[in-house]
Amino acid sequence: MEPIADLDWLLTALVFAPLAGALLMALIPQEEEELHKRLAIAVSLITLGLGVYLFAIFDYDQAGALQQFVDWDWIEVIGAGYTMGVDGMSLPLIGLTVLVMPLVFIYSWNHIPSPGNAKAFLMLMLILETGMIGTFVAQDLILFFVFFEVVLLPMFFMIAVWGGEDRRYASLKFFLYTLFGSALMLLSFLALFFLTTDPATGEHTFNMLVLSDAAGDDIVRSTQLIIFGGMFIGFGVKVPMFPFHTWLPDAHTQAPTQGSVILAAVLLKLGTYGFIRIAIPMLPEAAEAWAPWIGLFAVIGIIYGALGCLAQTDMKRLIAFSSVAHMGFVMLGIATLTDFGINAAIFGMVAHGLITGMLFFIAGSVKERYHTLEIDRLGGMLVQAPKLGWILGFCAMASLGLPGLAGFWGEFPAILSAYNPAAGIPEETFRGYMVVAAIGTVLAAGYLLWLLQRTAMGEPPEEFADDPEITDVSAIEWIAWTPFLFLIVLFGVAPGLIFEITDPAVVESLNNCIQVGCETAGG
Amino acid sequence: MNALLAAALPLAAEAPTSVSSVTRDANWFLENVWIIPLLPALSFLAILFFGKRMPKKGAEIGIAAVGLAFVLAIITGFAWLDHRDNFDGPLAESPATGIEPAQGDKLEDPTASHEGDDEHAIAVVSEDGTSSADSVALTADPVDDGHGEEGHAYVAVQNSTQWFQSGGIEFSAGTLVDGLSVMMLFVVTIISLLVHIYSTDYVGGDRRYTHYFAFLSLFTASMLFFVVSDNVLQMIVGWELVGVCSFALIGHWWEEKPNSDAALKAFLTNRVGDVGLLVGMITLFFAAGGGKTFDTLSITNTINQGGVSHTALVVAAAALMAAVMSKSGQFLLHTWLPDAMAGPTPVSALIHAATMVVAGIYMVARLYPVFWEGMQIPGSSINLLATVGAVTLVGAGLLAFVQTDIKKVLAYSTVSQLGYMAMALGVGAWTAAVFHLFTHAFLKANLFLGSGSVAHAVHSFDMKKDMGGMRKFMPQTYKTFIIGSVALAGVFPFAGFWSKDEILTGTGGWGILGGTGGPGTYTFHLAMGMIGAALTAAYMTRCVYLTFHGEYRGNDHAHDDAHADDHADDHADDHAHGDPHESGPRILYPLYILSGFSIVIGFVNFPPGIALIPDGWHERFLHFVEPAGASYFPGVGHGTPSYSLAIISSLVAFAGFGLAYRYYFVKVDNLAKSTGQHLTELPNGLVTTRGWARAGHKVLVEKYYLDHLYTGIIAGGTKGPIAKAANWTNQHLIDEVVDTAGRTAVKTGQQVYARIDQGVIEGVINGSGRISDATGEELRRINSGKVQNYAAILFAGAALLAGAFIILLAL
Amino acid sequence: MILNQFLLLAAALFCIGVYGVLVRKNGMLVLMSVELILNAVNINLVAFGALTDDVGGEVFALFTIAVAAAEVGIGLAIVLLMYRNRRSIDLSEADLMKG
């Protein structure tokens, strides 16, 4: 479908509004903490407003086409353009980002982690927001890469400065791991650039639209496989996919609450988004060849992540490991290369963002109250902080894929799609994956309920029995959390809200796949 | 193989497949049953948000909503009775929207030519050839006995709308009303209502009273949602939601670890079954739904028309079996159900006896063609479903003997009765299974609530320690409990007799004395059913004796340990000491109503051929519930009931009763009276004197060691060694690779730094620095600050330059 | 060769001047020696101007005399200030420019 140029300023404004806010904050002295907080909330709310406006003027009948499209020259020498656009695949993720960020800022109102310095902390998060939104709107590989990397530094500093005891190791691991992936990814991008020519101009291009249309036609199969492999590692690290996942538990555990929430809610989605936006449409043939392997790593991740969870003694680390399992479901959906599976994957991303983000919020609040996340020391939260305990129970239920809540629609359709993957992909293998993934849901229930039992149920342990610091959910927390809880229910009851946006775009992006012989589910 | 079977088999094949048995245009109440689950759902929200501020702490909202739902269910029931016999409205197109059956030639009905696959619209086909009169003729009930109205076609009412769509697959939401769902609506709403009323007394003053009622409402809503769902996806949703409510209610007193353990066990065991549910439903979706629709009727229609490969059905049926085994407590996965008794007793009555645990049975009944074909029910003599049911019914019946906790006796009894239902479905006695589900719901709710009434008085569930002689204190409870017990034991003419007899008939194993069976010849299962009947009578006798007869043993110990039990600490009220006394009216009236049902509810399905019953009273239940002749239901044959079987099975039950009576009421009672001790067992009984009996007893006490296997080996293994191994792999293998890479990089860096950077590059840089330093040091001596020195140098320089200039010129 | 004699005279004057600048400790004498150097240059300029019949030589000589006058003015002022500050015009004592 032809891209639709409507408002040429909107996406630019959306992407750079947080950055502008960060620059503005740079001019204000550090002592004005409250002003910084107000400003950060205001900026993120403005961004949210722009996002809402984007949603309002989005043409849902043409969700398969890129909208608000801009294509300006940027670095002409290397053929990189300032190309941006939004379609049904990126829209939900942009919505997730612009929604989560204000809530994180609101939560930061009285939760600036040690060693303080609200100014720097909030500025970093605003820069992060620019990077994340930018990644979701970029339609040029170089632009995409720049935004993808912009995300890296603020996160590194958030972990390295405001993190837990082992923050240096964790932040460095996070940084090096993702940088390693990015390097391979960049190599793949360059390979694509040099091996593809734009039929219109006869020149090499980084334009993602052109590259998707070309769908790797000019590239020999073996090269395609290698290029895809580079992207696989690059995006797979970010997802994170087994076996590239080990940075995640450390980063999550050490990161401040806000960092964990952003990491879980949005950052991990950059990787899966890369798969569906770049890797698969641009190299459908290689995707087909790689699919069984992606599926294999996905189901290993599901089981392995769940087993990892069962062995954890730290609440935050457990939740972090659960991300490995949940992203496994997302990757399984992607690996089927069917429109149904990829829709499920996008839904899974949004659902995981909301649910796991919320779980990290809870972990942060538990840490604040109990000063520990050691599961064995916790207990009886339902007695001392009943609302917090119930919210934990609710999120655990959502996370284990209870129907009626958002998690189910990420999980069940992914399992369903594995029964019938796209043509050219071995069916039997994927049916095996389906069963394994279904077994993963048992383990998910196991570790989540076990967590719930050990932290929330029972009588409070002696050391916390009369602790006056253990209070129930505060007003700020309610404000920050209510939208999460509401959306978890809303998307659970009305999954069509997301599926119907993503569907046309996914079908559109799989058109190339169909050309090389894959088919869609049920077809 | 008997003759009736031969007659039934062709029916299955010749069933008029082209005619749909569904309408979208019926009585308003049948079309809008979605209101019934909606009411308790709203009540859940209302109680959650406003419950604590209400004068009765939210109980009144729940009761009002469920009461209203009950009234609506009754109206819907009557509407269905009318609809079943008098419906002549338009039929909907074949529900298989957009599916090509494998054998397309079977679909030659003009309705099939309709291209307008409008999924929301009420597709009416009255204008073409399939006038309802024709379809009536085509779908005449194959087993009807010739009454005019009996010949009316069975037409289910479906009303669905698109929920959302994704990847070309439409997800619809809707309601399906036929006899089965109407029956379930009635059962769920009435028992839920009675349990609500009962609970206001039973859990009165509980610290989470409001939460309790909220979850009761949510459970009721989920269960109703489950039974009216018109597609398998919606069934999964309802299935899981009832599981969560069960989790929350079992763990209602989560302060004590055993309760939360039981809740976790229930949920996780059910999750294991859910793997089967997911896999089975997905298989059906692709194999029978064509990868397009989850619609139950489309799926069953397609299967009925033979459009699905046998392999797929075997896989689906086997996978769904796992779900049935977990949810409906069939053998191997039943272990959670007795533990679930950790919840409040009314919850046990509602969820773990009457409604939720029959969800598996309901699911099999709803998707019967899957099992009919997949398990090869017709024409065989053994299959997985029937055998699992048979093993369950005997295995659990034996376990009920060694329990000291009254609720656990009833729990194992429930497992055993669920085994009856599963076995009945497995042998092809569909109606018998559903009928047993129906009667069992009332009489087991009766028994559970009765046990709760006793426990409420003595603050314990332990029959041996804290009960005995209760008939003196609680005469009303005693009467209702006795009625429930005899009904459960299958004594004529109480409810259990009729349904159990029908199941035994349905096994088709009774060929000796005239009675012939249903679709297959399941002799082994008939035998197991007989044993089960004897066991039921015997363990209920034991339970009644230990609870209500003999001397009251509760005063032996001064209630100091009674508080260990669930809600006892919330009831430190006036009757905590002294003799127990009868419960209040909010507990008794539900008991009266339920025991009334336990007496009469069996009359709704008199077997044919009883001369004393007036014409038109026979097999009402079968007529209104079984979708005989409907295109989505296999042509199930029915056994012919025989007096001989009824009499023999009654005698067997009486034998069980007699043995237990002789042991407890005669021997133990006499010994207790003569010695003046409070005895519950004979001191020199078989278990103590015979080695084999002791071993058997031990196996039973240890519950066949299944819990050791599950909790200790499987769960413990996963949680312990396996998870630890995975974590170890993570930390020491995968992470080690990463860390080693990191360390190597750092080491390489250090080497590079030390050798190249510090050695070579630094050497050059530092060297140049040192040189300039030294030069400067030398030169600064010249810089004396004396102008004349400077001038001297200047002139010397000038002279040198001049000399050089001259030399250059000379060259 | 008339030019040679002029050049020899100028060279001699220049050398006397240089000797004075380098050797004398008295600031006044150094200034006078500088004047000798400048005048040696002037002689050269006039001589070459006459030889090439170019008036530029004379013009430059006059220009140098004017500059020299200004230079002597500044030089005397420096010597005067030096004397005021240090009560001495001995250049060997003035080493403030030492590096």
Image: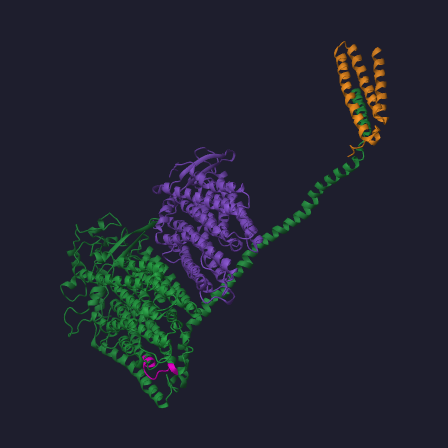
Q: Quarter of the image containing the N terminus of chain B?
A: bottom left
Q: Quarter of the image containing the C terminus of chain B?
A: top right
Colour of the chain lettered A = purple
Q: Which range of residues does the magenta coloring cover? A: B544-555
Asked if the stretch drawn in magenta spans residue A123, the answer is: no
Report whether residue B447 is seen: yes
Q: Closest to the observer: B181 or A115? A: A115
**Chain shown in orange:** C
Residue B119 lies left or right of residue B782; in this view the side is left
Where B688 sits versus B619, above or below? below
Residue C27 occupies quadrant:
top right
Residue B639 lies left or right of residue A97; in this view the side is left
Residue B286 lies left or right of residue B737; in this view the side is left
Colour of the chain lettered B = green
Q: Closest to the observer: A488 or B803? A: A488
Where A283 sits versus B314, above or below? above
